[in-house]
Image (cartoon, rainbow, N blue to C red):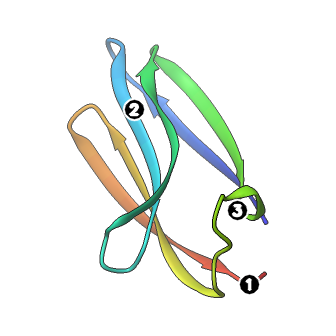
């Protein structure tokens, strides 16, 4: 299952963190960590490539851009 994660950075370059987390918000795997320039960005990530296989279920996609943070549910069915 491949995720396409769009996000945008406004103003100045910002630290960007995208992680897959469990429902307790504990990090499972970093997807992207780095400084992003202003503009629209897309990160693609295939959940089947994780070092440890995931069980079927609901996970959280954590996105932090600068000081702004969001979580989005992701249902995974292998």
Image-based side of 12 in relation to 36, left or right: left
The numbered mark at residue 43 is: none
Residue 10, located in which quarter of the rendered image?
Answer: top left
Q: Report how far apart the C-alphas of labels 1 and 3 lie in the structure.
A: 10 Å
- Within 10 Å of the Cα at label 2, are there few (<14), some (14-19), or many (20+) other Cα atoms? many
Describe the element under mark 2 as helix, strand or loop.
strand
Residue drawn at 28 percent across, 49 percent down: 69
Mark 2 against mark 3, which lies toward the viewer?
Answer: 3
- Within 10 Å of the Cα at label 3, are there few (<14), some (14-19), or many (20+) other Cα atoms? some
Image-based side of 24 in relation to 52, left or right: left
Q: Report how far apart the C-alphas of labels 1 and 2 lie in the structure.
A: 27 Å
Residue that numbered label 3 is attached to = 47
Residue drawn at 34 percent across, 56 percent down: 70
Q: Position of residue 18 (x, y in %)?
A: 46, 46
Asked if residue 13 is positioned above or below residue 25 in the image, the reply reads above
Q: Position of residue 17 (x, y in %)?
A: 40, 39
In which quadrant will I find the C terminus?
A: bottom right
Residue farthest to the left, as pictured:
67
- Within 10 Å of the Cα at label 1, are there few (<14), some (14-19), or many (20+) other Cα atoms? few
Asked if residue 28 is positioned above or below residue 19 in the image, the reply reads below
Describe the element under mark 3 as helix, strand or loop.
helix
Image-based side of 24 in relation to 19, left or right: left
Asked if residue 36 is positioned above or below residue 19 in the image, the reply reads above
Q: Report how far apart the C-alphas of labels 2 and 3 lie in the structure.
A: 20 Å
Front-lying residue, 62 or 31: 31
The answer to whether mark 2 and mark 3 are in CB contact below 8 A is no
Residue that numbered label 2 is attached to = 16
Q: Earlier in the sequence, mark 1 or mark 3?
A: 3
Image-based side of 12 in relation to 8, left or right: left
Residue that numbered label 1 is attached to = 77
Q: Earlier in the sequence, mark 2 or mark 3?
A: 2
């Amino acid at each position: 299952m491949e995720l396409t994660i769009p996000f945008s950075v406004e103003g100045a370059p910002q630290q960007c963190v995208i992680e897959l987390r469990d429902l307790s918000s504990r990090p499972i795997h970093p997807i992207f960590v780095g400084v992003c320039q202003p503009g629209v960005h897309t990160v693609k990530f295939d959940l089947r490539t994780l070092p440890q296989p995931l069980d079927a279920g609901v996970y959280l996609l954590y996105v932090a851009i600068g000081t702004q943070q969001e979580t989005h549910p992701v249902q995974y069915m292998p």
